[in-house]
């Protein structure tokens, strides 16, 4: 067995249908009594379900700030901070996907307020010490153990409303964390176990969710898978796939989960010649792969009925060259060297929506 180092992130997880009823206990465990609730405008009604649960346990929320926004713009954080201060909040409860978790992290790292996260997508931000923020159109990312939410409540009941298409792409976003953890430079056997189990759980449950969005068993299995994949994201380094998605999101305004979904099979195809063992392990947990991980992913994406081309989201063909320039101009570790021509062709295939092939 190869030598390795293993770091575990602290944090408490409360998992299961109905576990939201334990929210008051979790607030009291932290010796807090005036939580500020956070959500996006789209989930402003849904988050109100927390108010009676808290009030029944004699906890009155300090307030609700429902303007969380994708990529955590700092002007939104500043506004939320003024509000948190004005209403005397002593902790924050983020309720939603990565956008709302990001706002909770941004407030928590600036103020030291404890952060309880209630994720309602599969993006996985709640398990990472990473915060990406945007100011004046530029996204910067930082990592600090203090960014990690101290408590996470995974209650499947709040994922039942996640639209089928976002369930599919958000789930593939989670699989991408696991796949890159398998071949990370600082991977370890524990992360491999989590990555394979998480991928298997998602690959089996997502096609069921797309056809039967109210299937609670499938939703629960997907949330379990997403948690494991998120632990991978929070523990080891990411490479080509995540860097490419970061470029496409940050510089070309491509949507987060949808971009991860389009890029994943192509990024793996690019790396395939250098990661034969990972490809085999991955194939073993992807249904109908016939021993070929890229085929397994292509089959999964077909079953999920997702869009396959960046052009479907407004990216222009001339941006392919620009994206390739940015991607090669920003060095990072990857199992295969970043070579301009094959990378450009990889991005072109993502743009055009072609099936991934390991022939570059
Ligand atoms: P999101 O949080 O932007 O949510 C997308 C939309 O779905 C929003 O309108 C939201 O209100 C809605 N939604 C969420 N859950 C719902 C539910 N159960 N029912 C109905 N509607 C629901 O999307 P996301 O993909 O979860 O997060 C993307 C953001 O998170 C990006 O900014 C990305 O950079 C960040 N992110 C950060 C990390 C990290 O480790 N720092 C990890 C993953 C994602």
Image (cartoon, rainbow, N blue to C red):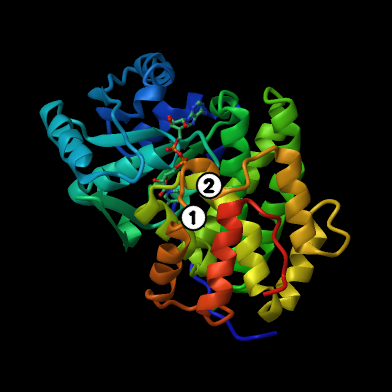
Q: Residue at x 34, y 46 (%)?
A: 71
Q: Give residue 317's mark.
A: 1
Residue 196 in the figure: left or right of residue 56: right
| Residue 56 image point, x, y percent | 39, 14
| Residue 209 image point, x, y percent | 70, 32
Q: Quadrant of ligand 1?
A: top left
Q: Residue at x 24, y 27 (%)?
A: 34
User: Of all residues shown, which one is farthest toward the front?
Assistant: 318
Mark toward the viewer: 2 or 1? 1
Residue labelled 1 has its Cβ within 8 Å of some atom of ligand 1? no
Cα separation between marks 2 and 1 = 8 Å
How many numbered discs?
Answer: 2
Front position in the image: 178 or 116: 178
Determine whether the residue tagged by mark 1 lies in a helix, strand or loop: loop
Residue indicated by mark 2: 311
Disc 2 + disc 1, Cβ < 8 Å = yes
| Residue 76 image point, x, y percent | 22, 37
Residue 2 in the figure: left or right of residue 332: right
Q: If the image is split into quadrants, where does the C terminus sit?
A: bottom right
Q: Residue at x 62, y 53 (%)?
A: 175
Instruction: Specify which label sits upstream in the sequence, 2 or 1.
Output: 2
Q: Is residue 1 above or below residue 244?
A: below
Q: Quadrant of residue 337?
A: bottom right
């Amino acid at each position: 067995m190869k030598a390795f180092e293993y770091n575990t992130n602290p944090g408490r997880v409360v998992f299961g249908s109905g576990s939201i009823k334990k929210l008051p206990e979790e607030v009291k465990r932290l010796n807090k009594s005036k939580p500020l609730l956070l959500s996006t405008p789209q989930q402003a009604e849904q988050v109100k379900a927390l108010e009676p649960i808290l009030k029944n346990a004699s906890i009155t929320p300090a307030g609700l700030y429902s303007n969380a926004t994708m990529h955590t713009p700092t002007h939104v954080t500043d506004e939320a901070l003024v509000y948190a201060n004005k209403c005397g909040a002593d902790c924050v409860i983020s309720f939603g996907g990565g956008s709302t978790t990001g706002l909770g992290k941004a407030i928590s790292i600036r103020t030291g307020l404890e952060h309880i996260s209630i994720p309602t997508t599969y993006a996985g931000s709640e398990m990472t010490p990473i915060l990406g923020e945007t100011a004046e159109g530029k996204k910067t990312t930082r990592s600090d153990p203090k960014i990690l939410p101290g408590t996470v409540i995974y209650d499947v009941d709040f994922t039942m409303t996640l639209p089928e298409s976002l369930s599919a792409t958000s789930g593939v976003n989670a699989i991408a964390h696991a796949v890159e953890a398998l071949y990370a430079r600082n991977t370890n056997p524990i992360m491999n176990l989590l990555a394979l189990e998480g991928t298997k759980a998602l690959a089996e449950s997502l096609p069921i969710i797309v056809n039967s969005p109210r299937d609670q068993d499938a939703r629960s299995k997907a949330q379990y898978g997403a948690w494991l994949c998120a632990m991978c994201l929070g523990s080891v380094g990411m490479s080509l796939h995540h860097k490419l998605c970061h470029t496409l999101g940050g510089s070309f305004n491509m949507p987060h989960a949808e971009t991860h979904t389009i890029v994943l099979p192509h990024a793996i195809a690019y790396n395939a010649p250098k990661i034969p063992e990972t490809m085999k392990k991955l194939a073993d947990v992807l249904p109908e792969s016939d021993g070929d991980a890229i085929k397994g992913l292509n089959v999964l994406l077909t079953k999920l009925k997702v869009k396959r081309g960046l052009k479907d989201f407004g990216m222009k063909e001339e941006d392919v060259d620009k994206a390739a320039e940015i991607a090669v101009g920003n060095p990072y570790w990857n199992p295969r060297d970043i070579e301009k021509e094959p990378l450009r062709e990889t991005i072109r295939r993502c743009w055009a929506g072609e099936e991934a092939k390991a022939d570059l």
